[in-house]
Amino acid sequence: MKISKENVSGSLNKIQFPSSESNIVDSGSLLNVQVFGKEIVLDIEISNPTLQYKKKVESLCIQNLKNSFSNDLIIKINFSQKEVKKEIKISGNPIPGVKNIIAISSGKGGVGKSTMSANLATSLAEIGYSVGLVDADIYGPSIPIMFDLVGESPQAIEVDGKKKMNPLSNYGVKIVSMGSFTQADQAVVWRGPMASKALNQLIWDTHWGELDYLIVDLPPGTGDIHLALVQAIPLTGAIVITTPQQIALADAKKGVNMFQMDSIDVPVLGIVENMAYFTPEELPENKYYIFGKDGGKHLAENLGVKLLAQIPLVQSLREAADAGRPAVLQENTEISESFISFAKNVVDSVNQRNSELPETEAVRITNMKGC
C-alpha cells in the first residue's frame, strides 16, 4: 500500500486510545500527518500527559503503521496536551432561597466600597427586606468592624445532614466574613486560587435561609476574586462605587467594562458616587465639592448606566463605621436619607433588570486574553 497522508490516516483510524472507546482519527486527536519518503511525522493531541500514556500511544501507532506499510519506516510522533475545559453553567439561582445576588465593586481602593456595602445591606433590611452580606474582601475584611462583630465567629449547624455555617447577624443583616476567622492583626497572604476557594466556602458553606438580597462586598480592582465570583454564582447585577475625582473615575470605568465584557456579561445596576460633596456639621446647608463635582454622575451618563446615589462626605459616616453601627441607623439625618434613597433605587433597578432581562447564569470562562 502506498504511503500517503490519506492511507496513514486510514490505518490509524483503527487505533483506539488506551482505556477509551474513541479512536485517534475520529476523536480529532490526529492533528497533522506528514510523509517524507519512508519517514512519517504525526502530531497527536492527548488529554493524559503522562510519559507512560505517551509510550502506549506511540507503541500502538508505530506497530500499526509498520504492519500496514513497511518494517523499515521511520516514525516520529509529536505530542501536545489537549486543553481540558471545565465549564460551569448554572441556570437560575443556585443558592436555595436567595432571590437576588448583587456584587459591590470598585476599580480602586479607598472609595468607600465596604461602607457602601454595609449601609446598603442595612438600608434594605430597614425598609423590610431579608438581607445577607458576604465580605469577599479576603485580604482586607472590614465588615466585622462596621457591624460590631469583631471577635465573633459563626457557629456550625446541621442542615439536611450537612454541616453549614450559621451566619452572624446584626441590624437585621446576616453576615459572613473572612475577618471572623483571622486575628485582627493577621495578614492573609494567599495566592489567587486559595483566596478564590475561601470565597466559595463563604458563599456555599453558609446556611442563608430565605433572602431577598445577598450583597457581596468585593475587593478593589478586577482580579481573581471577581472572576471566581462570576464563575461560582449567577449574579443579578453589579454596582460600581467611585468618588468624583478623575483618578477614581478612570478605575471605575474599568470596573464597569469588566462586568460588561462579552465573556462575563453581568448587568451593571448602576454607579454610586461616594464623597460627592462635604457638608460640615455646623453648616448643614453648605456643600463643598472637595473631589470635584458630579464626576460619578457624568460617568454614569457616558456609560449609559444609572446613577444610584450621591453620598455626601460627613463626619458621622466615618464615626458610625468605626463604632460598628451603620450610618443609615441615624434617624432623620441627611446621611440616613441618602442611604434609604440608595436602597430604594437599587430595588427599582433590580426589579427593572429582572423584568427586562433573562435569568442570570454563572459565567463560563475557559480562556480570557490578558488573564
Image (cartoon, rainbow, N blue to C red):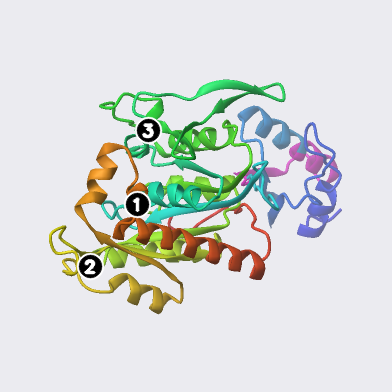
Q: CA distance from mark 2 to mark 3?
A: 32 Å
Number of residues whose C-alpha sits closer than 10 Å to that of mark 3, classed few (under 14), some (14–19) or many (20 or more): few
**Which-is-in-front pick, marks 1 and 3?**
1
Q: Nearer the viewer, residue 238 or 348?
A: 348
Q: Which mark is residue 331?
A: 1
- Residue 218 appears at what percent x and percent y? 42, 47
Residue topped by disc 3: 190
Look at label 2 and name its amino acid. Gln
* Marks 1 and 3 close (CB-CB < 8 Å): no
Residue displayed at 68% across by 31% down: 53
Q: Is residue 343 left or right of residue 87?
A: left
Circle 3 — which element?
loop
Q: For residue 39, which numbered disc appears in the image?
A: none
The residue closer to the viewer here, 68 or 212, is 212
Q: Is residue 100 left or right of residue 285?
A: right
In which quadrant of the rendered view does residue 289 lie?
Answer: bottom left
Location of residue 267 (image quadrant): bottom right
Residue range of the region highlighted in magenta in the rendering:
61-83
Q: Nearer the viewer, residue 131 or 17?
A: 131
Residue in the picture at 42% in, 75% down: 303
292 to 105, vertically: above or below: below
Outermost residue to the left: 282
Where residue 84 sits in the image (x, y, percent)? 64, 44
Identity of the amino acid at label 1? Glu
Q: Secondary structure at mark 1?
A: loop
What numbered label is drawn on residue 245? 2
Q: Nearer the viewer, mark 2 or mark 1?
A: 1
Q: Nearer the viewer, mark 2 or mark 3?
A: 2
